[in-house]
Image: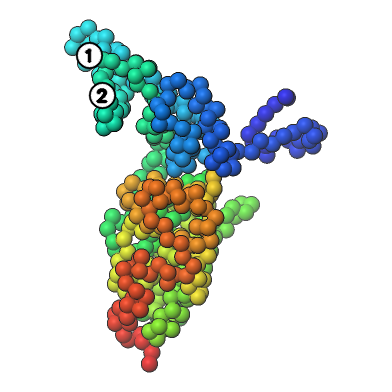
Amino acid sequence: MIAASNKEALVDQATRDRFEPNVFYVHSPLNDQEWNEVVQIHLRRYKRFLHPEITSAKITHLFRMQRILSPRAAAETIYEAHRLWASELTAAYELHTATDEQQSGLISHKYAIDLERLNDIIQISRTEGRRLSIEKIDENSYPIRLYHFEKAIEALESTQERQQRELGEALLPPSPLLGVSFGLYATENGVGGIIAVECSAREIIPGQEQVSVTGNSSSAIIGQTMVPDDSVLQSAQNATEAVASWLWSVSRINLNRMHIHFQIRSLLEGAPGQGVSGPSAGIAMVASLLSELSGLPISPSVVSTGTIGVKFDVGPVGGLGGYGTQTGKIIGILKSRRVKISDLILPTANYNVAKDEMHILTEAGVKVHPISTFTDCIEILFGVTGKELSRKIRKRFAKFVST
């Protein structure tokens, strides 16, 4: 063994060619079984301290839900869980051996966070019918729990990641608003979150483009030039054309006489090279437009992702399955705090190839709704049938009805 690296692309090509017969690539875990094996290896050294509730499968499941995406991050998290547990034992021992109230006070202040976690575990044990007290805690009576792994993940989440998530959620309205729907984004490094799609509709001005979009600041850098990504505008045009075609067929409403404006609101909006990219906001755009037209608000707890065709057909998107960069939207749902997600609307194609991820969401209390056409989700979004929805729109915009 001359050397090893987890960044194969950085190894000089001449070196790789020269030693090619002796170079082996070890890929990251590809499925839960392989992840269980990695987790089991790292748990092995702490086996005698683990609570019976801890299994490699449960830890893998926890990692999947919390975006632990590499073996190194898994190892760090397991080590951190052990460190937290050890700190709690130290706090319990020093508090028990304190000689006076002043010393007890100093120890309580020094180990405040550790003692808070310890008391949480004591309460958990009591709900299980087992009584623990700080005076009798040692490494045999006080094992490492799943709780420690959850806290370890929280501790290892960077301040920047946490602030980005909180700032992103601050852009979301806490209550339903007309013309607003909620979609999902995912970045190239696997981070994801929720976006708000806002729509306004008014009578068009002669010579004006029918559809406009703000917030689609995603772009690519080619050489020294920043090239805007117009895929969000294309999705907005598709969404508008799909709604126009549907309304004409069911209510004879002429949407071409209206100007439709969409605004994509997310933390990434305005960041060079970032923003909302691709057609995955298509379903959310249709939903926001129909909300604006019908006067029916959409709950912030319902999110959607998927492409939209001009005939209301729904197509697949990325960020909804597997590991690494393909987990962003799942993690955005699971880590949402300000808005508790209750429902996910997604393409049937994505649902069929990401059953493990869908199971994780279901266990987290999220209802998953696979759809093939937008009409499949009208009642989920608005609480009325497609026929009732078109009737409301026709009533509000009677002057746009052609006879």
Query: Extreme front residue here?
Result: 129
Give, as a three-letter code, the residue at label 1: Ser
Judged by depth in the image, the label closer to the viewer, 1 or 2, is 2
Q: Quadrant of residue 70?
A: top right
Whether pointer 1 and pointer 2 mark residues with C-beta atoms closer than 8 Å, the reply is no
Q: Is residue 379 visible?
A: yes
Q: Residue at x 26, y 29 (%)?
A: 129
Q: Which callout, 1 or 2, points at the residue further toward the start of the chain?
A: 1
What is the x, y in percent for residue 236?
A: 47, 68
Count of numbered tags: 2
Measure how far apart labels 1 and 2 are at the Cα level.
Answer: 23 Å
Compare residues 31 and 157 and report the one nearer the observer.
31
Q: Residue at x 57, y 58 (%)?
A: 227
Query: Extreme left residue here?
Result: 101
What is the x, y in percent for residue 126?
A: 25, 29
Q: Is residue 226 visible?
A: no
Give, as a three-letter code, the residue at label 2: Arg
Q: Residue at x 43, y 31 (%)?
A: 54
| Residue indicated by mark 1 | 104
Tell me the quarter of the image containing the C terminus. Answer: bottom left
| Residue indicated by mark 2 | 131
Compare residues 52 and 63 and report the one nearer the observer.
52
Query: Extreme bottom residue here?
Result: 403
Q: From the viewer's perspective, is 8 left or right of 325?
A: right
Q: From the viewer's perspective, is 337 left or right of 318?
A: left
What is the x, y in percent for residue 397?
A: 32, 81
Compare residues 111 and 34 and report the one nearer the observer.
34
Specify few, some or many for label 1: CA neighbours under 10 Å numbering under 14, 14-19, or 20 or more. some
Tell me the quarter of the image containing the N terminus. Answer: top right
Q: Residue at x 33, y 51 (%)?
A: 340
The secondary element bearing badge 1 is classed as: helix
What is the x, y in percent for residue 151?
A: 37, 32
